[in-house]
Amino acid sequence: MTAHHPTRRSILKSAGGVSAALALGAGGVLGSASSAAAAGDGFGLRIVDRNESDYRMWYYRFATDAIGWNPGVNVLLPDDYHTSGRTYPVLYLFHGGGTDQDFITFDREGVRAWTAGRRLIVVMPDGGHAGWYSNPVSSNVGPRNWEHFHINQLLPWVEANFRTFAEYDGRAVAGFSMGGFGALKYAAKYYGHFASVSAHSGPASLRRDGGLVAHWANASSAALDLGGGTIYGAPFWDEARVNADNPVQRIESYRNKRVFLVAGTSPNPVSWFDTVNETQVLAGQREFRAALDNARIPHESYELPGGHFIRRDMMQRDIDGIVARLRKA
């Protein structure tokens, strides 16, 4: 799948001293509010690059005080968005960690095909190479407040600029690996935001095995994102922050939600990264599922052969389940 790369096609108009960025939509026709209006600034976000030329995949890059660089987002629209006048449910889909992971990850993996013919908007933002969907305890490279960016800026910006159901039953959150953790975290911490949550090889337990996942969050963010800063604090954790973020400590917050979990059972024994990651994912998801069962909270979960990778058939199954759970367009 070809990644949707940015190009600049914007017209700056000034009205009454207020600047608004308007972009040419599909076919070079300026969108209208009733069909596909060009998105504007707001909620602490200033659009610095955009491409609204593709019929389905619209790209934006923002300047924001929450992040020390300009994060991007892909917004994937339903096939009939420009013609139907409908309002749609929305999925926030989060990428995993690593220097090769960003807001284009799921376009590379096939999200256009997974959503073809389905009335669902999919929002895929940057989350940092190791941002852990968090506001870190410390950063030596300027702000990296991904949680604030996603929840307090991006989510209301999407709802102001696209025809979405701005309600509990109108939103889902999902992700892979680090993004799966982010989805579980946001769904619990912001209970009223998301009616469906999905973790594809996402860790669900921060404290098990001596706090291995929390330590990994600290180490990876220090190396890749924070210039030696940490997500949870070192050598001593901000315990309240770990408690608030840890899915297995927030079990009641998953009640009345659709919960979808995927973990691999046979990581590549030659790959240290694959083995450590998916072994911990599987153990943490089993702990999480047991706690859900004890609380009589239903969930849909899969243990499948293989290690730490995006299972496209499970993404397809998940998206179809999300569409079934959320309010219909």
Image (spheres, grey):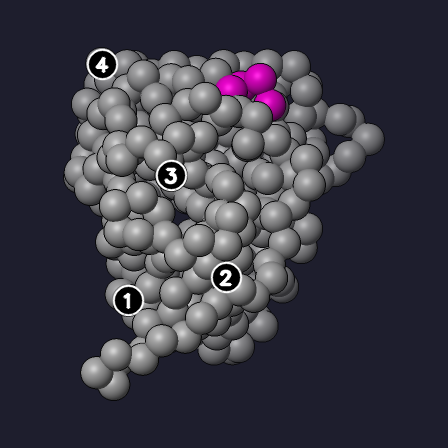
Residue 33 is situated, as x and y percent measured from the top left of the image, at 26, 51
C-alpha gap between disc 3 and disc 1: 23 Å
The residue singled out by tag 2 in the image is 50
C-alpha gap between disc 2 and disc 3: 18 Å
Q: Nearer the viewer, residue 296 or 83?
A: 83
Residue 54 on the magenta span: no
Counting residues from the start of the chain, the first of labels 2 and 4 encountered is 2
The residue singled out by tag 3 in the image is 82
Counting residues from the start of the chain, the first of labels 2 and 3 encountered is 2
Label 4 vs label 3, nearer the camera: 3
Q: Quadrant of the N terminus?
A: top right
Whether residue 325 is situated above or below residue 108 in the rendered picture? above
Counting residues from the start of the chain, the first of labels 4 and 3 encountered is 3
Label 2 vs label 4, nearer the camera: 2
C-alpha gap between disc 1 and disc 2: 15 Å
Residue ID at (20%, 42%): 166
SS at mark 1 in the image: loop
Counting residues from the start of the chain, the first of labels 4 and 1 encountered is 1
